[in-house]
Amino acid sequence: MDAPAAPGDPRALLADCELIEAFIIDVNGVPRGKWLQRDRAEALFAGGIALPRSAYLLDIWGRDIVEGGIAFDTGDPDGKCFAVPHSVAIMPWAEGRAAQALLTMQEPDGALFYADPRGVLSRVIGTLAARGLTAAVGVELEFYLLDPNRTGGQRVAPRGADESHWRGWQTDTLGLWEIHDYEPVLRDLLRAADAQSIALDTLISENGPGQFEVTLHYAADALRIADDAVLFKRAVKQIARKHGLAATFMAKPFGNWAGSGMHVHVSLLDRAGRNVFTGDEARAAPLLYHALGGLVAAMPDTMLTFAPHANSYRRFAPGTHAPVFGDWGHDNRMSSIRVINADPAAARIEHRVAGADCNPYLVLAALLGAIEAGIGEGADPGDETFGDKVAATAPRLPIAWSQATERFAGSPRAGAIFGAAFQSIFAACKRQEIAEFRRRISDVEYDAYLKNA
């Protein structure tokens, strides 16, 4: 007979539920899974539950990746998935009493499945740990709340939008009225985060109509922060739906309004918990600049993780807060990487390139892997950017989707960070999606060329 679950054990929570929603996070950051009856709860912790290994490698529409080498080439076998204990929580948005469980897949020998993005990040964290370093990470994540009824003649529109493009389209950056206007949904969102033990620091209104930003609490547990980011994105969409709204983390849902990004703050701690980036107010410790050097060198090759979709590249333009060079500067929000060291003890790097549509596991893996490589190489970050005057040494980023895909696919740096197998399947996923986009003709093309070409 199994021993009863101890107080605080997630199995006790599951035993009191009507059903369990168990899911993995695929390479695109999309939850994929199944509903389980509560009598299957124990299998989530001992023995595992079966999901197709190919569930990790689906395109954004949920189709198998033909060239991925998992589904068609192998007979699409199952893998065993186990619950991430801290992810087990009641879903406040669900009918009845239902719980969630984030899963991670293991090989028969207990190793993490190579296509699991959570496993990719875990392995990168291990390379830092081998140097006696632990990453402390914080995330700022932006999103829009939309009217799913497409009001005001627009396919995508904020709540209350009209044809004048005034009512419902106003922006109120850092405005408290904007928060109060959405108070019921935002309060439910904060409650849902609390129910999932997702620690949030701040919530603000952002630069677009119905756009908000939350800050996930800075912590010395990069894997937990990535878990919290994916679980938070999931909660936002479900809570919005409950209130008759839609939520999107698209990088650029509106052509004329601000895009949505995911800024990442990183510092490194030694075995005693000291910040190894600490210098003085003028300049951080040398190790920070070696880390910067690694980030700058790897940024063009890992751009696909920061901007994984066709829409992602609409954020990037000169003179915006989504820059087109791999540059850096002290307290400079116009550069891709901002060095923050006004308080030397809190010296850190802010990486400002990723869109909110990214897979957080892959972004953190790209950043921490590049940082580890930069430290190991004693890398030089090149010249500093001041304001919007980009340093001549800064590499230009690939801001076309196909260019970023091929750069990632052929990069030894990306292969070293993600592993050659994951590098191959992620590139295959993006190539399949690019091929689909090329088959579809946009209304802009018809407007421009149908009569005049």
Image (cartoon, grey):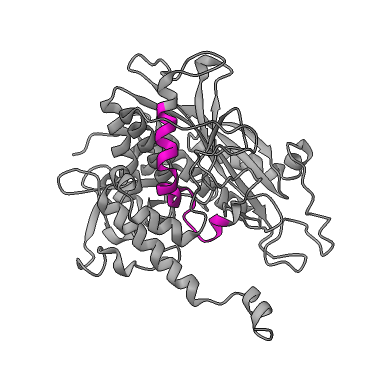
From the viewer's side, name the closer residue of 265 and 18.
Answer: 265
**Residue 296 falls within the magenta-colored stretch:** yes
Residue visible at 69% across and 42% down in the picture: 206
Q: Which residues are magenta?
A: 290-313
Residue 243 in view in this figure = yes
Q: Residue 376 occupies which quadrant of the picture?
A: top left
Q: Which residue is located at x 34 percent, y 56 percent?
A: 409
Q: Residue 83 location in percent, x, y?
A: 32, 44
- Which residue ends up furthest to the front in the rendered image? 392
Residue 52 visible to the viewer: no
The residue depicted at 45 percent of the width and 18 percent of the height is 285
Q: Number of callouts in the render?
A: 0
Would you place residue 167 above or below residue 92 in this image?
A: below
Task: Examine the image and state in which quarter residue 205 appears.
Answer: top right
Residue nearer the viewer, 402 or 193:
402
Indicate whether 240 appears above or below 282: below
- Residue 355, image x, y percentages: 54, 48
- On screen, residue 45 versus residue 162, left or right, reads left
Please indicate whether residue 195 sits to the left or right of residue 69 in the image. right
Q: Is residue 11 left or right of residue 145?
A: left
Q: Is residue 287 above or below residue 355?
A: above
Q: Quadrant of the C terminus?
A: bottom right
With respect to residue 270, does 210 lie above or below? below
Prevailing secondary structure of the magenta residues: helix
The N terminus: image quadrant: top left
Write the residue at 49% across / 19% down: 284
Spot occupied by residue 15 in the image (x, y as percentages of width and height): 36, 43
Q: Is residue 451 left or right of residue 420?
A: right
- Magenta includes 346? no
Q: Position of residue 414 (x, y in %)?
A: 34, 47
